Image (cartoon, rainbow, N blue to C red):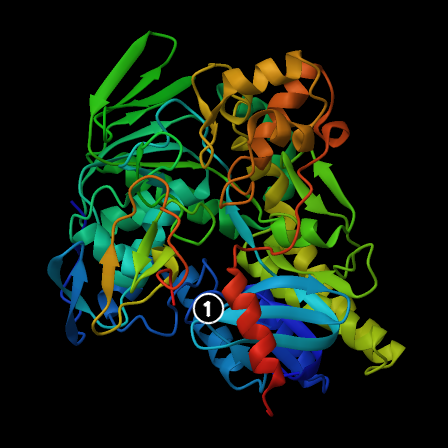
Amino acid sequence: MNGGSVDLAVIGVGPAGMSAAITARKHGLSVAIFDEQNSPGGQIYRNITGLGSDRLASILGEDYLAGRPLADAFADSGAIYRAGTTVWRIGEGGVSWISAADSGETAALHVLVATGAMERPFPVKGWTLPGVMTAGAAQILLKTDQTVVDDAVFVGCGPLLYLLAYQYLQAGVRIRALIDTTDKSSHIAALPSLPAALLKPSYLRKGMKMLSAIRRSETPIHRGVTEVDFSGTDRLQAVRWRDRVGEHSIECDHAFVHHGVIPNVNVTMATRCTHRWDEAQTCWRPETDAFGRTSLDWLTVAGDGGGIGGAKSAALSGEIAALGIAYDLGRIDRSAFDRASGRLLSKRRRDLAVRPFLDRLYRPAPRFRAPVDDEVVVCRCEEVRREQLAKAVQEGCPGPNQLKSFTRAGMGPCQGRMCGHTVVETIAQLSGRSPQDVGYYRIRMPIKPVTVGEIAGLTASQGEPS
Amino acid sequence: MFRLLEATGRPMTAIKVDGRTVQAEIGANLASVLLRAGFQPFRTTPVSGEPRMPYCMMGVCFECLATIDGITNCQTCLETVREGMVIERQLGASPIKPAGEGAP
């Protein structure tokens, strides 16, 4: 096979993937690791090896720069790193991939999925308009190319939204307004989780520092926001919102939206390993044990792709998962495994202590997860509106897969990535069932769109002597 | 309009964006370069012709699609600038081309 044969194939070079590769190599496993981006770091440490500006480094801050030693250790790990490469098939025995220059298959005894998180969809009226993008997208523009835009309106809630606002302020980029959708009832609901969060106070301290810097700035902040939409003809012209006083609007060319992150489940879903609905994080996640082992014996998951825990926990999960794989493949003995994993598991438990508090505090209100306005576009690719979805459910459509036949929702190029969670929660709400009961789209290979030519190219290069 | 926070000092190259010559940093993220060049919209949708622009910048949403060097439906957020790159806007559904005239 032109892609070679290894003990472990890893998908994703973020904190989880890098740590897993380092640990697996330390225990003598051969590792091939794949990533769509051209440099390591994932989204959280995006462009960490190519930053080249001290000013940008100080704007992005120490949590971002923590990715540097990890990326350095990864570069020295001896893992075969295929950058700019898309894995389009994953299965027992290995993965198939394509890049601009090459395509092939890599055989592997075990596969680790570390594909991380994506931002939760923000299905409100006008969210498809040019000018509306996610806060994560805006932060990627800042990290990769120092690209920024003045006078954007920040809409939503959650740590990433406030972090980006903080970074913009540090960079001297003007912010038009912050429209905060944090549910008022969340402050009380999150209180029981506060004592646990105080066990790891550094996260709360950092959060308070960011929020107070935003408050001290000139940025107008609007709280208690219960409804939001975007208007404009061919591009964004205004953000409108509602609070207990009434309706408000502000003119703008750009809006950054954010309602937290969810596991990017397309790869794991395509393997058919068991997933379950996580009500605390309102998302699907693959069912795993503490070591990331799934219901399939050849497949392990590490990092935010297995449930949202943040960058530090993701790196720890990568180490823990790699130890489990090394043990399962018979490369380390039981006592070495227990010794190393015990320490890492308790470290991760401490790091995750803040999570239930954040999950509850920034849980998006139900109407932001399952829209109630019929005009809202649910599936961006096929332009399926909530109205069509509701009509299909009324006509007896039982779930997301049947909805594809009824409406084409989920059948566009993004393969359901952008609408999956909205569709599930909306069907659940309309039919009075739980998301677990409603289920998810059946995701099939290829995991990302590939042309027949690219698959044919694979066959041709396989025939060549390597 | 998107802008650079500060000059990067990276070597530049000329790329073609919808027939126009744009100076871009070699190795820069293509979607980011197109945003700064005022390429708006990136495309219009096959379903209704709605204008769209990058939404996620991480390969998930497929809103930033464009034709690069004759190859349709490329995710510009996953591409970096190369010398001589030619970017064309995709309007609506792409036509079905006779054999031999499609993407290489």
> Residue farthest to the bottom?
A465
Answer with the quarter of the image where residue A436 lies.
top right
Answer with the quarter of the image where residue B84 lies.
bottom left
The disc labelled 1 sits on which kind of residue? Gly
Q: Nearer the viewer, residue A116 or A45?
A: A116
What percent of the width, then of the height, locates residue A105? 63, 75
Q: Dot 1: what SS?
A: helix
Q: Residue placed at 35% from the left, 37% from the top?
A: B45
What percent of the width, then of the height, locates residue B55? 37, 43
Q: Residue placed at 59% from the left, 36% from the top?
A: A420
What percent of the width, then of the height, locates residue A421? 59, 34
Residue A438 drawn above or below residue A104: above
Tag count in the figure? Answer: 1
Mark 1, other Cα within 10 Å: few <14 / some 14–19 / many ≥20: many
> Residue farthest to the right?
A334
Quadrant that contains the N terminus of chain A: bottom right
Q: Residue placed at 44% from the left, 34% from the top?
A: A380
Q: Would residue A212 be seen by someone viewing this image from the given angle?
A: yes
Answer with the quarter of the image where residue A281 lies.
top right
Q: Would residue A317 be seen by someone viewing this image from the given angle?
A: no
Residue A327 drawn above or below residue A320: below
Q: Residue placed at 19% from the left, 48% from the top?
A: B39
Residue A117 drawn above or below residue A423: below
Q: Which residue is mark 1?
A: A67
What percent of the width, then of the height, locates residue B20? 11, 57
In the rendered structure, the residue with mark 1 lies on which chain?
A: A
Q: Nearer the viewer, residue A450 or A305?
A: A450
Q: Is residue A424 left or right of residue A109?
A: left
Q: Is residue B98 left or right of residue B6?
A: right
